Amino acid sequence: MSGRTHARACPERTCVGCRERAAKSDLLRIVVAGDACVPDRRGTLPGRGAYVHPAVVCLDQAVRRRAFPRALRSPGVLDTAELRRAVEAVAGAAEATP
């Protein structure tokens, strides 16, 4: 036996905002496009990715800690305006659903 479990384990990633581990499906993948962070909802965009909970709190922590340039290995400051709009839309949709 190779030591692997027979049940498929759910892949886990770490949120760059709160640094908690969560299932990959519960997090939002972020990639760099030019000099901006963009959400990769389908997980298919090329390049290095970072993961964050789709919550404004985690996004604010990641921006304050300068986690995106470090995690994405990008020099300089990255624009997070588009990312903020996407996270607020997801968070708003989650609050509207009972």
Image (tube, rainbow, N blue to C red):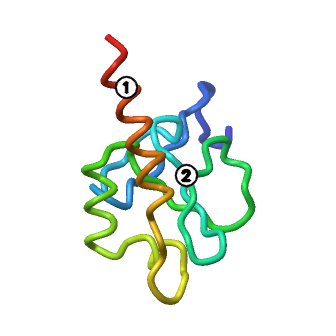
Q: Which mark is residue 94?
A: 1
Identify the residue at image location x=58%, y=77%.
35
Going 61% across and 69% down the picture, which residue do you hit? 32
Q: CA distance from mark 1 to mark 2?
A: 18 Å
Residue 71 screen position, x and y as percent: 47, 72
Determine whether the residue tagged by mark 1 lies in a helix, strand or loop. helix
Q: Quadrant of residue 96?
A: top left
**Most foreground residue, 70 or 98:** 98
Q: Is residue 87 above or below residue 63?
A: above
Q: Under tag 2, what secondary structure? A: strand
Relative image position of residue 65 (x, y in whole percent): 28, 73
Residue beneath disc 2: 29
> Which quarter of the image is occupied by the C terminus?
top left
Residue neighbourhood size for the residue with mark 2, other residues' Cα within 10 Å, grouped as few (<14), some (14–19), many (≥20):
many
Give the side of residue 37 with respect to residue 6, left or right: left
Amino acid residing under circle 1: Ala
Q: Residues within 10 Å of mark 1 (few under 14, many from 20)?
A: few
Tell me which amino acid carries mark 2: Arg
Does residue 40 appear to the left or right of 60 in the view shown? right
Name the front one of labels 1 and 2: 1
Q: Which label is found at residue 30?
A: none
